[in-house]
Image (cartoon, rainbow, N blue to C red):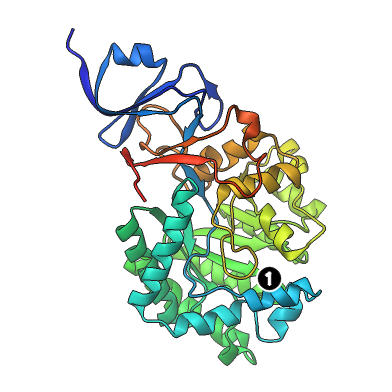
Amino acid sequence: MTLAPCDLLVHGAGVLFSGEQVLEGDGVALGDGKVLETGPSSGLRERWAPASELDAEGGVVAPGFVDAHVHPAFAEGRAGEFALRSRGADYQEIAAAGGGILSSVRAVRGLSEEELALKVAGHFRRMRRHGTTSCEAKSGYGLTVEEELKSLRAIAAAAESTGMEVFPTFLGAHAVPEEHRDDPDRWVDALCDEGLPAAAESGLARAADVFIEGIAFDLDRSRRYLEKAKELGLALRVHADQFEILGGVELAVELGAESVDHLEMLGDGGLEALALGTTFAGLLPAVAHFLGQETDAPARRLLAAGVRCFIATDFNPGSCPCPSLPEVAHFARRRLGLTAEETLTAITSTAADSLGAGDRKGRLVPGHDADLVILDLPDLDHFGYFLGENPVCAVVAAGGVVEE
């Protein structure tokens, strides 16, 4: 019998995880950038002739991680603020003093587009070393129309140079820039009249996001921005209920947002809205840890109510300088009370579904993109157990082993 050719055979998995459940077998056949078949490697060898092989050596094989909330378009970190925070200053106090997001804005504006693209590419490579093969990527540290578009172009250039698959999001409504502080409506006007149309028409963004908080955008301005984005055909993603309840969750659900993220202060009204709608909950447990917040998003209540939840890093320079989903998995398990299987599902299939890409990302099933990770773990329960250690020993993206 003539064997069918395939590009890569991964074999020897101790655990094979589909993105939703543990599969039978220890192998995956990949070809033409797609998953061809999973199952016992002995059976796969009877049907496929691989051009190359990769031994999982008893580790956990899972889909490539999908990080569905990332702020990669930044120029430098904010370690000075971390020192202030360690002495008791909180996020709002730092922002009110001119730090926080506005500090990162000044740094981004000081870089050329090419320099920023190199920075973003470096961030993507760090993320991929920790197993992320696809990510949502937001602008948000430019805060002029042109600087926001510059950030989106830098994200696109970094994606092309690194091979990271990116789902770009326009986050012009991240904060009110200093030059518009006395009249925030002027900035919302600029976003609705110029920024959102330019991001949509150029194809630089597939979604728009807004930070609904007292230190950022109120409900009325957020509604105007989101309704304009929706009118332009952009998907909606929302930051809400991180520090206070303003009704942002209910607004996100009303407008059919893909996701509403943070939710550390989620109230009963927001939970009920999510339970009745189709909006995903984006949970970012490493942020609460980094900021020293005592309250976490109520993950178990959300899941019990039937709300689909993904886990993401929120990788950014100020409130979560962490590019590692395996590290965030620890906080998902420890602070949110998720199981290893729930956590791994939340950073693969559910994250992909929240981006409208679940038909090709986040699952090890035939026909899906050939993105996978091999984790040096003896079983699934060890995922999220270790601290300060990267369990990723191999990354396959688009069917090829990533060498970095």
Q: Is residue 185 found left or right of 62 in the rendered image?
A: right
Q: Report the quarter where the N terminus lies.
A: top left
Determine the residue positioned at 71% across, 41% down.
333
Tell me, yes or no, if residue 247 can be seen here: yes
Q: Is residue 257 above or below residue 360?
A: below
- Left or right of 74 in this view: 307: right
Q: Where residue 351 appears, x then y in whole percent? A: 54, 45
Q: Nearer the viewer, residue 92 or 115?
A: 115
| Viewer-nearest residue: 252 or 16 | 16
Identify the residue under disc 1.
Answer: 219
**Depth check: 263 or 343 in front?**
343
Q: Quadrant of residue 168?
A: bottom left
Residue type of the residue flagged with mark 1: Leu
The 10 Å Cα crowd at callout 1, few under 14, some 14 to 19, many 20 or more, is some
Residue drawn where x is 71% and y is 86% of the image: 97
Q: Residue at x 34, y 56 (%)?
A: 162
Q: Position of residue 360 (x, y in %)?
A: 40, 38
Q: Is residue 398 above or below residue 143?
A: above
Quadrant of res 209: bottom right
Left or right, 56 with reference to 260: left
